[in-house]
Image: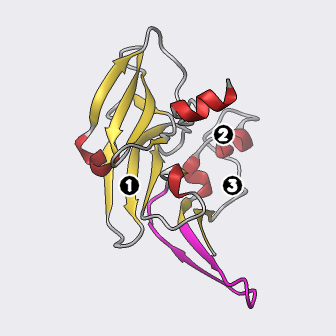
Amino acid sequence: MILDGYFQEQPMPPPRSDAPKGFGSMMAYLDEHSFRSRLHRWRFNLADGTTREERLDDAIMEFGMINGRFGGRPYRYGYSTVSEPGWFLFTGFVKNDLVTGERWTYGLGPGRYGSEAPFAPRIDGYLVSFITDETAGISECVILDAARIQDGPVCRIALPHKICSGTHAYWADRAQLEQVA
């Protein structure tokens, strides 16, 4: 059995010395870089109880997504967020090929922060994220072609008002929504 996730080298980070007095511990837990989380794979041998593990990428990243149609089955690509050191702000996305080790990135640009990016299955698929532009004071929904995230959005939808960065999201297709209704 295989489990991909994020190994936190520092799951209980020390308080940040640059934080306002009394907020050092809280600020450490709001900084993805304090945890030093990296894409990791664990292989569990259910017959003999042993575990092998390996790092899949050296970059600090978190909030992973895959094509949900492959949940519990082998898959090839994983998508993660990258963040600005010192803050819990997602500044871009990484696509990892878990077979070849290749990676592709897309950065959001200065003052632009995203949400986690759920995978919307379609032919190859799309990543969907809400972006907050702190400089312009606006937000938008962007859609990235999962096959070529490095090319940037294939669609941008202006939102009627600014939302907070880091909004959590999940992709649900029409069939899933109809089951709940």
Numbered badge on residue 13: 3
Residue at image point 32% right, 66% down: 102
| Mark 3 element type | loop
Residue pointed to by mark 1: 95
| Magenta extent | 40-60
**For the N terminus, which image quadrant?**
bottom right
Q: Who comes first in sequence, dot 3 or dot 1?
A: 3
**How far apart, in angstroms, are the residues tagged by discs 3 and 2?**
10 Å
Q: How is the image coloured?
A: secondary structure
Tell me: residue 134, above or below residue 9. above
**Local crowd size for mark 1, using a 10 Å CA cut-off: few (<14), some (14–19), many (≥20):** many
Task: Verify CB contact (< 8 Å) between mark 2 and mark 1.
Answer: no
Query: How far across and down, in percent of the image, does residue 25 sit?
Result: 73, 44
Residue at point 55% right, 65% down? 73
Q: Are marks 3 and 2 in contact (CB under 8 Å)?
A: no
**Does the residue at mark 3 contact the one at mark 1 (Cβ under 8 Å)?**
no
Q: Point out which mark residue 27 bears.
A: 2
Q: Name the residue type under label 3.
A: Pro
What residue is shown at x 67% (from left), y 32% (from top)?
Answer: 20
Q: Amino acid at mark 2?
A: Met
* Residue 174 in magenta stretch: no
Direction from residue 5 to residue 160 in the image, left or right: left
